[in-house]
Amino acid sequence: MKLSGEEVKHLALLVRLGLSQAEVERFREQLSDILGAFEVLRQVDTSDVPPTAQSIALENVMRDDEPAPSLPVDQVLANAPSQEEGFFRVRAVLE
Amino acid sequence: MDISGLTIHEASELLRRREISSLDLTRAALERIARLEGKLHALVTISEDMALQQANQADDRLKRGEATPLTGVPAVIKDNMCTKGVRTTCSSKMLANFVPPYDATVVERLKAGGMVMVGKGNMDEFAMGSSTEHSAFFPTHNPWDLSRVPGGSSGGSAVAVAADEAVYSLGSDTGGSIRQPAGFCSVVGLKPTYGRVSRYGLVAFASSLDQIGPLTKDVTDCALVMNAIAGHDPRDSTSLPYPVPDYTRWLVPDLRGLRLGVPREYFVEGMQRGVEEAIRAAVAKLEELGAEVDWAVSLPYTTYSLAAYYIIAPSEASANLARYDGVKYGFSAQEAENMWDAMEKTKQGGFGPEVKRRIMLGTYALSAGYYDAYYLKAQKVRTLIRRDFDQAFEKFDAVITPTSPTVPFRIGEKVADPLQMYLSDVCTLPINIAGVPALSVPAGFADGLPVGMQVIGKPLGEEVLLRIAFAYEQATDWHKKKPEL
């Protein structure tokens, strides 16, 4: 399993993770090694095995939709890098 | 008498009899912190003012006779659990200045019980790691040998307890992050059944695997902390809606009638001889205490756990960590050309190397064309690993293994080789994959360094684990040994 630099850059773009050229090169090598170690799973016959997403028997836990107090706006915004008039301030989405 | 070395149950007894005050106990912990933090670096934040205030409140409560066993007892909380008004960093540059507006459910419950919080425990960034070297701030040092790692990711929580900077702590465990540092620091660490303890307010890493649990100086204390934190929480829909027993009722020094299995797959290639010898001696002790032991059990899918785990956990992490976009909270890159550039630079600057590596790995396993071969395949193997445990628990009350294949390794030894680092969790990750509970209890030393014994149980079988660990602890004195600092 050998990844190319282009594949590494494509993955980074999918998650919007900025990488330097040095990081691209390092991850190319390290991810190739790690993915190589995962090849061992091919030996396991899973043809009739259902997947497990979580380990508890609970399914579709529902609750009544009851109004309850929530945090005040100033506390919610207290950690915001940028805010304006009670809103999170963001960069233009369309330019 | 040095009161910083007391356990919860010892301290609680002295507090109740008014022989010491919570303020005495808290000052002793803070003095210990002031003296040792320069060497150990177990804490990201020291919450001295809050601790002294909580100690005064606890003393009032003790006077009124309304105390719980945890009232007035100093604790450390891992820095990935939200603490209202006290910064919660996940040992990441991304959250270095994040001050939560609310408490995690576990913190809320401990506060209701009268906790004194002296600080927040250092960790591998976002709980990704096995040595606490991946903290964005500083590595934590093992109190038994300062040149070695304390394990991870809850390294700070384990060291704070081992070095008497706190009486107990909370950690979180996604693939061994409570048990492995407990083993490396010679304290007791329990990862409860998935869903037994609420995850509300725990910063998410891998949501189907994460679980909060106690790190304590002995097994009785572990039961006491579990009594306080376990149970259903309507704010965590994965928390289990079942009643919580009084865990201390199961602490009896006798193992007659219990059937234990020792699976050969856990004595892996590369296991240190001293570790294997210590664990075999510990199991022989369990046999002496009345347990019936089968030494040749097989859990055949164990060998695939590492690969399955390092596909499933990073996949979930890559989804969970997508929220750090620099808009609502956390680090935010200011110098950027446009929205996308800002987002890329925020993640590039806010996350450290191991977190980036796992985001990339998870993204790969979930991406078009690879989903079936990696993520779906790993989930199917997860089913087989669970079935191994289901079958074992038809015959046995618990399964006994080493917590780690080695004693604590040197700082710097594995940090440049991610695969070698991942292998240090080989004995603990299958348990998270299966969602069952497991505990690490001190089981001696190899070359002067701690060895932990892992006791694995059925879903919601924490009582049995505590009973086994308690009986073993009463018959040995490993938990009374303290590092020289």
Image (tube, grey):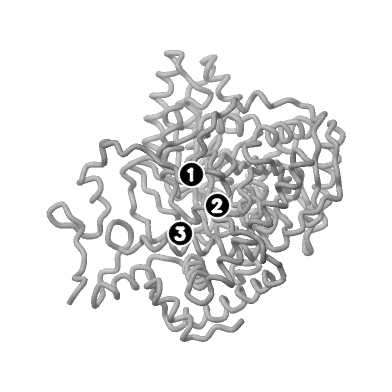
Tell me the kind of residue under disc 1.
Thr
- Mark-to-mark CA distance, 1 and 2: 10 Å
Between label 3 and label 2, give the one nearer the viewer: 2
Between label 3 and label 1, give the one nearer the viewer: 1
The location of residue B274, given as percent across then percent down, is 81, 54
The location of residue B82, given as percent across then percent down, is 40, 45
The location of residue B390, given as percent across then percent down, is 70, 47
Q: Using the rendered image, report if marks 1 and 2 lie on a common chain.
A: no
The answer to which image quadrant residue B291 occupies is top right
Q: Secondary structure at mark 3?
A: loop
Discs 1, 2 touching: Cβ within 8 Å:
yes
Q: Secondary structure at mark 1?
A: loop
Badge 1 is on which residue? Answer: B238
The answer to which image quadrant residue B47 occupies is top left
> Which of the marked residues, 3 or 1, is nearer the chain's N terminus?
3
Tell me the kind of residue under disc 3.
Phe
The location of residue B199, given as percent across then percent down, is 47, 44
Q: Residue at x 82, y 54 (%)?
A: B264
Mark 1 burial class by Cα count in 10 Å: few <14, some 14-19, many 20+: many
Q: Chain of mark 3?
A: B
Q: Chain of mark 2?
A: A
Mark 3 burial class by Cα count in 10 Å: few <14, some 14-19, many 20+: some
Badge 3 is on which residue? Answer: B137
Q: Secondary structure at mark 2?
A: loop
> From the viewer's perspective, is B141 left or right of B251?
left
Q: Chain of mark 1?
A: B
